[in-house]
């Protein structure tokens, strides 16, 4: 169910990009951009913070830099590390996505998807995440 919801959300985001005539960034890249927000991060930090899951984060960051959504610079402290942040074009796209979220939030008013129910759902998903994180001890594999 979570996977299906995620796919539906990415479809909704794609429709929003299409409506705005934005063709040089895809929906997954848009969410990476949105989650960067006002931060200044390394590619590794994107993954560690859970902003992106996948093996091609470097490719997506490269495409966003090439298309002007992200600005990159070498870290002052570690010359091997490259830091990224939103460019002006990236901030403009983040604002479009924020406006979409705000529209969706207003449409939820008066429905069964109340703020309280969504908050409870979020708490439950965090509990499931912690449970699964605790199940990743592979030391007992093969001993059963």
Image (cartoon, grey):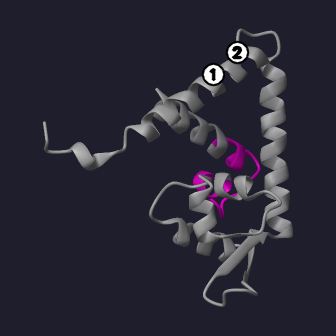
Mark 2 burial class by Cα count in 10 Å: few <14, some 14-19, many 20+: few
Quadrant of the rendered image containing residue 71: bottom right
> Is 29 placed left or right of 54 in the picture?
right
Are the two marked residues, 1 and 2, in contact with CB atoms closer than 8 angstroms?
A: yes
Which residues make up the magenta segment?
Answer: 15-30
Distance from the alpha carbon under mark 1 to that under mark 2: 6 Å
Residue in view at x 80 percent, y 21 percent: 107
Q: Nearer the viewer, residue 13 or 31?
A: 31
Q: Is residue 28 above or below residue 11?
A: below
> Is 59 placed left or right of 73 in the picture?
left
Q: Which element carries disc 2, helix, strand or loop? A: helix
Q: Is residue 133 above or below residue 109?
A: below
Q: Nearer the viewer, residue 143 or 127?
A: 143
Position in image of residue 102 (x %, y %)? 84, 34
Q: Nearer the viewer, residue 70 or 14?
A: 70
Residue in view at x 70 percent, y 58 percent: 33
Mark 1 burial class by Cα count in 10 Å: few <14, some 14-19, many 20+: few
Q: Is residue 19 magenta?
A: yes
Q: Is residue 46 magenta?
A: no
The residue that label 1 is drawn on is: 121
Position in image of residue 81 (x %, y %)? 63, 82
Quadrant of the rendered image containing residue 86: bottom right
Position in image of residue 13 (x %, y %)? 66, 43
**Taking the image as drawn, is residue 12 in sight?**
yes
Residue in view at x 66 percent, y 51 percent: 31
**Taking the image as drawn, is residue 68 in sight?**
no
> Is 70 placed left or right of 43 in the picture?
right
Query: Looking at the rendering, in which quadrant would you find the C terminus?
Result: top left
Kindly identify which numbered label has been placed on residue 2.
none
The residue that label 2 is drawn on is: 117
């Amino acid at each position: 169910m979570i996977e299906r919801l995620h796919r539906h959300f990415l479809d909704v985001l794609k429709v929003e990009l299409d409506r705005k005539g934005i063709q040089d960034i895809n929906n997954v890249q848009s969410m990476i951009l949105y989650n960067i927000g006002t931060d200044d991060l390394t590619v590794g930090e994107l993954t560690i913070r859970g902003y992106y899951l996948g093996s091609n984060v470097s490719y997506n960051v490269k495409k966003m830099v090439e298309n002007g959504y992200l600005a990159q610079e070498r870290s002052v402290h570690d010359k091997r590390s490259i830091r990224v942040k939103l460019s002006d074009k990236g901030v403009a796209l983040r604002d479009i996505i924020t406006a979409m979220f705000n529209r969706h939030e207003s449409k939820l008013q008066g429905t069964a998807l109340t703020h309280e129910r969504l908050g409870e759902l979020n708490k439950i998903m965090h509990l499931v995440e912690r449970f699964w994180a605790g199940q990743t001890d592979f030391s007992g594999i093969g001993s059963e």
